[in-house]
């Protein structure tokens, strides 16, 4: 649980500094700079830490200001995430019930067939989702040609329904990123999870650099990057800052930054972790909003534990995307009717799908294909 001291940290440093901090916290200074200069990727870790450490209400307020400057603050993107291949994963991510290394009672399943996947996408669209994300519990897609080709087919079909399409399939090769782009993929999700320093405590079967490499292939192929992390893994606040620093200093910021709160699942090594508090989410969301102003900041796993007023604070802080649907891969998600009611009560509107690279999709992909073949 966060202490009062950590929530009010700067005010407690000294009473004489109170006026100074209340009028010009790092959040205020950096938010003003972000509004004036736009996104930048030369953030120092200390700068981000100072923003993160700002008094919580000040941080929230300035996150909201940047949000209103960079986005239509009433619009919230609704994404539906479907697990198209569940469980049996060879990786050892300590938080994940889909790892075959942990006894979580989850039954491994094969890749879902086309009718089932397209049926789920249609249902999601009818329920207001504009982005359909397909997740497969794989370490990587290398050596899965048949399954990968099936997924390319799913991407084409769902894109044809007028939805944005996202995939999260583990590590991918450069040529696979190009093929996904050609199929019409909007975004590829590959989270960094936590800071580079804390990462080995969470996963040992692939490196932080492996993850960054996949993100680079995705970026090079012209697919939007979706990458964020999870809080509540036992990491220090410094690691949360480290995660945001890595994301905010990528050559181009991710278009989507999911902020997940751990759902501790029985049978995983992190089963006994304490639940994340709303203040921790607000600190992460506001800081992400100030340092990556244009990104869609997604209130992701763990949302189910937050009340409507708590979620409202997250939207105010700068979150503008949520996952809708019964489940988030394998863990429970918010009730559809409750989400509809929340949108109505908070005056939120669903964000329409956008395909900014529509006209150049084929051309760019072919150019990328050539580059990839040349590099292979
Ligand atoms: S998070 Fe992904 S890669 Fe890690 S164990 Fe779960 S399914 Fe596998």
Image (spheres, rainbow, N blue to C red):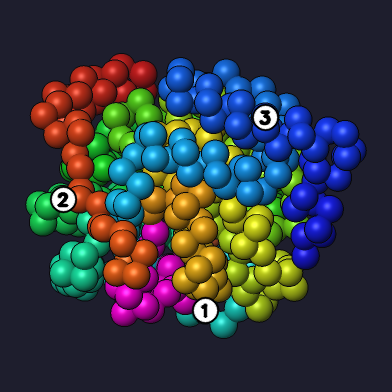
Q: Relative to 121, is 195 above or below?
A: above
Q: Secondary structure at mark 2?
A: helix
Left or right of 344? Residue 101 is right
Q: CA distance from mark 2 to mark 3?
A: 46 Å
Residue 92 pos. (x, y %): 63, 58
The image shows residue 100 at horizontal and vertical percentages of: 58, 68
Which label belongs to residue 277? Answer: none
Dot 3 falls on a residue whose secondary structure is loop
Task: Residue 2 in the image: state x and y as whole percent.
Answer: 77, 60
Q: Which residue is mark 2?
A: 159
Sequence-first tag of 2 and 1:
1
Disc number placed over residue 24 in the picture, else none: 3
Q: Is residue 169 above or below residue 217?
A: below
The label nearer to you, 2 versus 3, is 3
Magenta run includes residue 325: yes
Going by the image, does 67 lie left or right of 196? left
Going from N to C along the chain, the mark reached first, 2 or 3, is 3
Check disc 2: other Cα within 10 Å, few if <14, some if 14-19, many if 20+.
some
Q: Which range of residues does the magenta coloring cover? A: 322-342
Q: Residue at x 67, y 29 (%)?
A: 24
Query: Which residue occupies 59% across, 53% down?
Result: 282
Mark 1 — residue? 106
């Amino acid at each position: 649980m966060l202490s009062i001291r950590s929530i009010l940290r700067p005010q407690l440093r000294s009473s004489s500094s109170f006026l100074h901090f209340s009028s010009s916290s790092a959040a205020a200074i950096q938010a003003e700079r972000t509004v004036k200069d736009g996104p930048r990727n030369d953030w120092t870790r200390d700068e981000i830490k100072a923003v993160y450490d700002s008094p919580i209400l000040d941080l929230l307020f300035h996150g909201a200001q940047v949000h209103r400057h960079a986005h239509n603050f009433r619009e919230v993107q609704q994404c539906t995430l479907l697990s198209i291949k569940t469980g049996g994963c060879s990786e050892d991510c300590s938080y994940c019930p889909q790892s075959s290394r942990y006894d979580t009672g989850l039954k491994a399943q094969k890749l879902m067939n086309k009718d089932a996947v397209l049926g789920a996408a249609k249902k999601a669209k009818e329920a207001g989702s504009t982005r359909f994300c397909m997740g497969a519990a794989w370490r990587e897609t290398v050596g899965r040609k048949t399954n990968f080709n099936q997924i390319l087919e799913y991407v084409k079909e769902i894109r044809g329904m007028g939805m944005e399409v996202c995939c999260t399939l583990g590590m991918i090769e450069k040529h696979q990123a190009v093929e996904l782009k050609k199929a019409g993929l909007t975004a590829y999700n590959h989270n960094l999870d936590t800071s580079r320093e804390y990462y080995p405590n969470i996963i040992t079967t692939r490196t932080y650099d492996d993850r960054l490499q996949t993100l680079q292939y995705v970026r090079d192929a012209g697919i939007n990057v979706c990458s964020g992390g999870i809080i509540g893994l036992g990491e220090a606040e410094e690691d949360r800052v480290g995660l945001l620093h890595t994301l905010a200093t990528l050559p181009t910021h991710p278009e989507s930054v999911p902020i997940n709160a751990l759902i501790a699942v029985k049978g995983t090594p992190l089963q006994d972790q304490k639940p994340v508090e709303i203040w921790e989410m607000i600190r992460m969301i506001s800081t992400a909003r100030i340092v990556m102003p244009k990104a869609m900041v997604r209130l992701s796993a763990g949302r189910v534990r937050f009340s409507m007023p708590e979620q409202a604070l997250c939207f105010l802080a700068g979150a503008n995307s949520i996952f809708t649907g019964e489940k988030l891969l394998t863990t429970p998600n918010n009730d559809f009717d409750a989400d509809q009611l929340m949108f109505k009560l908070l005056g939120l509107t669903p964000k329409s799908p956008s395909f900014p690279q529509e006209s150049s999709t084929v051309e760019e992909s072919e150019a990328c294909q050539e580059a990839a073949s040349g590099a292979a």
